[in-house]
Amino acid sequence: MSDDLTPTAVLDSDTERIKALRLRNYRVTMPGPCADVSLPQHLLDAGVQHPRCKAVVVLTGNDEVNLKISEGYDLFDHRYRR
């Protein structure tokens, strides 16, 4: 996503991966809070309701959480999207 200059937020519950993210030389800013994506408030804080949010990619080690978040993404308020 950085190569396409697509602003991206990365959430991860693993502090070491967040630290590694901050050390990378991405072409765009990639905020990376340490957060549990299974908690909806963390996704909201990351901007899933922002009008420019185009997609949510969920890659956890738990298929049930992945499915729950990807299905729930459609339930977030998208009235401001084009």
Image (cartoon, grey):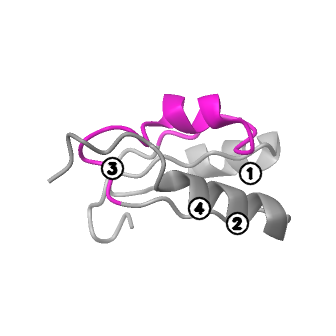
Q: In the drawing, does residue 20 fall left or right of residue 75?
A: right
Q: CA distance from mark 1 to mark 2?
A: 22 Å
How many labels, in total?
4
Dots 3, 4 in contact, CB < 8 A: no
48 or 31: which is nearer to us? 48
Q: Is residue 17 magenta?
A: no
Q: CA distance from mark 1 to mark 3?
A: 23 Å
Q: Nearer the viewer, mark 3 or mark 2?
A: 2
71 or 57: which is nearer to us? 71
Mark 2 nearby-residue class (10 Å; few <14, some 14–19, many ≥20): some
Label 4, on which residue?
71
Label 3, on which residue?
53
Q: CA distance from mark 4 to mark 2?
A: 6 Å
Q: Amino acid at mark 4?
A: Glu
User: Mark 3 falls on what kind of element?
Assistant: loop
Q: Nearer the viewer, mark 1 or mark 3?
A: 3
Q: Main secondary structure of the magenta part?
A: loop
Q: Amino acid at mark 2?
A: Leu
Q: Quadrant of the N terminus?
A: bottom left
Label 1, on which residue?
17
Residue range (magenta) = 31-54
Label 2, on which residue?
67
Sequence-wise, the earlier of marks 1 and 3 is: 1
Dots 4, 2 in contact, CB < 8 A: yes
Mark 1 nearby-residue class (10 Å; few <14, some 14–19, many ≥20): some
